Amino acid sequence: MAPPFFFLFMNTPFRFTTCRAGSEATLKRDIASHFVGELTPAFMKPQFITWKVKHPGFSPPKNLSHFARVSGISLGLCKTLAELVEHARSLGSKPLRLHAFPRITAEDGVEAATWQRIDVLTAEITAALKQAGITLETSPTFAQGDLILDVIVGEAAEEPLFLGYHEHQPGMHTHPGGLPRIALPADVPSRAWLKLEQALAWRGWDQLDLSGQTALDLGCAPGGATYALIQRGMNVLGIDTAEMDPRVLELAKSKGVRFDHWRTAAGRLNLTALPKEAALLLCDINLAPPLVIPEIQRIQDAVQARRLILTIKLNTPALEDRAHEFIDTIRDFAPAPVFATQLAGNRREICICAG
C-alpha cells in the first residue's frame, strides 16, 4: 500500500527547482538566504537544481523561490516508462496531472520541434499510466492541492528523464514548466508583447474579456505591451518619453480603440489628468525598484486599477537579493492577491501580478 501523500511530501529528502538560463546563481542565493542550514544544493545542470533537506523534520514551503519556475519533490532520474509508472504508483491513488517540459528554454520561447518531441513523449507516458490504472486529471481548471507529476526532458534523446511532483498552489504556473506555448510574432514592436502575454497566461487573465476597458502602460515605448492590449480591444494610455512604434497607432485605428501617448516621465505625471479608474496598470520602466515602485504606488493610488502587471528590474545581484523586500512593498498598496514569478520571457527581472 502506498504511503499517504502528505507523508511523502514531508519526508522526501530532496527538492527540485527549475529556472531561467542565467538565474541559477540567483536562485541558489535566494534559497540559501531563506533556508539557512536547511537546504543545500545537490545536483545541478543548466536551469535545474536539486536540494538536499538536511534535517528530516524540516518542511520547506511548496514554492521555494520567486526565481524558481517550478519547485517540488524530487523523484530522481528515470530511464524507462516502467520506472516512471512505478514512481507514479508511489504517489498513491490521487489523480495526477502530467506536466512534461524541457529543461533548457530560451527567453523568446521553446522551438516547435522541441514541443513536438515532448508531445510524442507525453502521449506515450499518458498511455502507459492509463494502462497501469493510474487516473489522470485533465480539467483545464486547476484546484489548490492538485497533484502534478513533473517530467523534465533533457536536450539529448538518450538523456534520462528527471521526475518530480508538486501540489498546485495559488500563484503557481498551470502550464507545464511555467512555459505557455506563446511565440513572439515577428511583426510586433518589442519583446514586451511576449512578456505581457505570458503574464496574462500565468494568472489566467488571458481568458478575460478586456475589450472597451482602460489600461495605463508606464514605460510603454516602443509599444510591445501596448500593442498586445490593443489587440485585446483595450483603450490604452501610454506613458513614456520615447517614441512609439507607428504600428501601435495604426492598430488602434484599425481596431477602433483609443490610444493616447503622453511623452513624459511617470514621475512628472499630473495625477488629476489620469483616468478616474482603470482595469489594468502595467509598468516596465527600466529603473531600479527603489526609484520606480514609489511612482507606481503614487499612480495606483490615483487610478485604483483593478489589476497590476509589473516588471521589476533586478539588474544587479544586490537588487536580486532584495526581491522579497520589493514584493512586500508592492503588496502594501496593490490589490490582493499579489504573486511574483520569473516568466519564461523575463531577463534580470521578475513579474508581479496583483488583483
Image (spheres, rainbow, N blue to C red):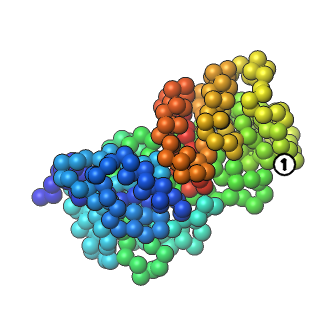
The image quarter in which residue 79 lies: bottom left
Determine which residue is flagged by label 1: 245
The spot of residue 5 in percent (x, y) is 22, 51
Question: Could you tell me which residue is drawn at 69 percent across and 45 percent down?
Answer: 286
Question: Could you tell me which residue is drawn at 54 percent across and 52 percent down?
Answer: 317
The spot of residue 268 in percent (x, y) is 78, 27
Query: Residue 59 or 295: which is nearer the viewer?
Result: 295
Question: Could you tell me which residue is drawn at 28 percent across and 64 percent down?
Answer: 75
Q: Amino acid at mark 1?
A: Asp
Above or below: residue 73 compared with residue 320? below
For numbered disc 1, what is the local secondary structure? loop
Q: Quadrant of the N terminus?
A: bottom left
The number of discs equals: 1
Badge 1: residue crowd in 10 Å (few <14, some 14–19, many ≥20): some
The spot of residue 293 in percent (x, y) is 62, 33
Query: Residue 251 or 10: which is nearer the viewer?
Result: 10
Q: Most extreme residue toward the bottom, as rendered? A: 158
Q: Would residue 12 be found to the left or right of residue 227 on screen?
A: left
